Image: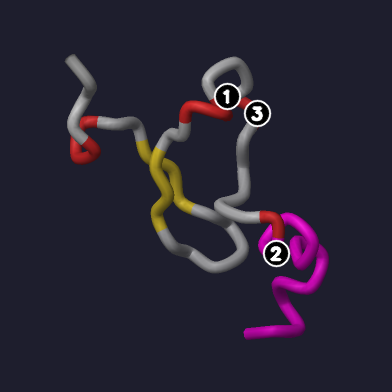
Amino acid sequence: MPVKKQHLPQKICPVCGRPFSWRKKWAREWEQVKYCSKRCREYKNNIHESR
């Protein structure tokens, strides 16, 4: 039986500040995942410029 989305682990993206949930493709590396998307990962160095 699948786990409901509200019960999945969540993190906050340091770039956009939005919460994001665990995904199956991140199962092996969830501890290392920091960014919610490819876009946020690419803009990680521009955090202070965009705000």
Residue 46 image point, x, y percent: 79, 73
Q: In the rendered view, does 31 fall on the left or right side of 43?
A: left
Please say if the residues under marks 1 and 3 sit with CB atoms less than 8 Å apart: yes
The secondary structure that dominates the magenta segment is helix
Query: Are there few (<14), some (14-19), or many (20+) residues within 10 Å of tag 3?
Result: few
Query: Are there few (<14), some (14-19), or many (20+) residues within 10 Å of tag 1?
Result: few
**Measuring 22% from the left and 21% from the top, which residue is drawn there?**
2
The reply to whether the magenta stretch includes residue 46 is yes
Which disc is residue 39 wearing? 2
Considering every residue shown, the one lying at the far front of the view is 1
Residue 17 image point, x, y percent: 48, 64
The reply to whether the magenta stretch includes residue 3 is no
User: Distance of mark 1 from mark 3, alpha carbons?
Assistant: 4 Å
Q: Which residue is mark 3?
A: 32
In the image, residue 31 above or below residue 13: above
- The C terminus lies in which quarter of the figure? bottom right
Residue 30 image point, x, y percent: 55, 26
Nearer-the-camera pick, 13 or 36: 36
Assign a secondary structure to mark 1. helix
User: Distance of mark 3 from mark 2, alpha carbons?
Assistant: 17 Å
Q: Which residue is mark 1?
A: 31
Query: Are there few (<14), some (14-19), or many (20+) residues within 10 Å of tag 2?
Result: few
Q: Which segment is the magenta one? A: 39-51
Q: Quadrant of residue 1?
A: top left
In the image, residue 40 above or below residue 27: below
Q: What type is the residue that disc 2 sits on?
A: Arg
**Measuring 62% from the left and 35% from the top, which residue is drawn there?**
33
